Image (cartoon, grey):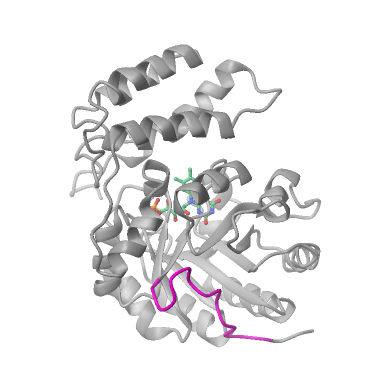
Amino acid sequence: MVSAGLQELPAPIKPGQPLTALAPMQDVTTLDFMRVISEYGSPDIFVTEFFRVHDSSRLEKHILRSIDENQTGRPVFAQLIGEAIPHLERTVADLLRHPIAGIDLNLGCPAPKVYKKNVGGGLLRDPARVDQILQALRAVCPGRFTVKTRIGFDDTAPFDEILDSVRRHRVDLLTVHGRTVKGGYRSAVDYDLIAEAVRRVPCPVLANGDVTSASSAVQIIAKTGAAGVMIGRHAIRNPWIFAQCRQAFAGEPVTPTTLRAVNEYAHRLFDATHTATIPEGAHVNRMKKFLNFVGQGVDPEGAFLHNMRRTQTAKALFAVCAQHLLRTPDKLFAAEPYDGVIARPNCEIPLPAAVA
Ligand SMILES: Cc1cc2nc3c(=O)[nH]c(=O)nc-3n(C[C@H](O)[C@H](O)[C@H](O)COP(=O)(O)O)c2cc1C
């Protein structure tokens, strides 16, 4: 067994700046999407979608491609979701044959079909089990071992114990998504608890959750003391965000984006996600998953979103893009999402205060 701990992290693209990471997102952070993002300005680090780990699991080939064929020039961490220690150990051994920057453990997935198996966010109901898993993974990761966690399951009571385990098992980097599992993608992000994590663990902490823009990244780092930020949905909306963060961290003006450039992004995404076998309807539906986020910065009424969601062919989709993005091509794409324009209404509309 190799025991290690507190390894140096990959150097940021701009020396001395806070780290930026593209958040792992299932069905989003594929090799193709990573390449598109890198063309607008890479994050310092990438993390794969999660590899599922169970008794009969094998490394999923499409996720492996984002490691083996990564040409972004930036390192990729491989994320695991699972709870059975022998299978986690076996999966780490398999992944160590690939060019990974480290192994990341998912302690946050809020999907009921996932957490009901006591993996991902489900593990936060059992901090003692988390401790055993961290101990085992630390022992078999000769390189970097990182953890991405939410702040609890129903409430934040277990967070202290999770932080103790992170400290005890010499995790190299901790990402904290400042919501409970129950909070899904709706509740307010608790940046105070992210700040608490920064004080409590010896490793660098990445703040995650609603980092909406370069200026919000600066504010969240100032508020939490985090070593950097991990950005998910707002990088889908705005793939320029990592380059903009580097400008903001350097105290330089942030280069705004025009609607013309957003139209080009839509075309680039379409080309990047095209495969010989994908039927047109499925390809258009896949595009909608990305454009749902993009639409948050196009118009405050959500008209682009409304029209885009009703298209069924590529021709109709790009007609909607042209209508909303090329009529006033020099108009600026909003730096922040417009209030009330929701990408995924079924899981992102905030609950009334009394219910939340
Ligand atoms: C479509 C989608 C898929 C996700 N898949 C994963 C995943 O595979 N692993 C993970 O740790 N988090 C996953 N997440 C959570 C994100 O990594 C991130 O923690 C969350 O979106 C909050 O960050 P944001 O506000 O910057 O989006 C996913 C989120 C979304 C929206």
Does the magenta run of residues contain 200? no
Camera-side residue of 44 and 288: 44
**Can residue 221 be seen from the camera position used here?**
yes
**Can residue 344 be seen from the camera position used here?**
no
Extent of the magenta region: 4-18
Q: Position of residue 279 (x, y in %)?
A: 63, 18
Res. 83 image quadrant: bottom right
- Horizontal side of 11 relative to 150 (left or right) equals right
Q: Which part of the image, by quadrant, shows the N terminus?
A: bottom right
Instruction: Judge whether 264 appears above or below 354 on screen.
Output: above
Q: Position of residue 68 (x, y in %)?
A: 73, 54
Camera-side residue of 18 and 119: 18
Instruction: Judge whether 1 appears above or below 319 on screen.
Output: below
Q: Position of residue 194 (x, y in %)?
A: 34, 71
Q: Residue at x 70, y 77 (%)?
A: 136
Q: Residue at x 57, y 41 (%)?
A: 27
Total labels: the figure holds 0
Res. 244 image quadrant: bottom left
Q: Residue at x 37, y 42 (%)?
A: 237
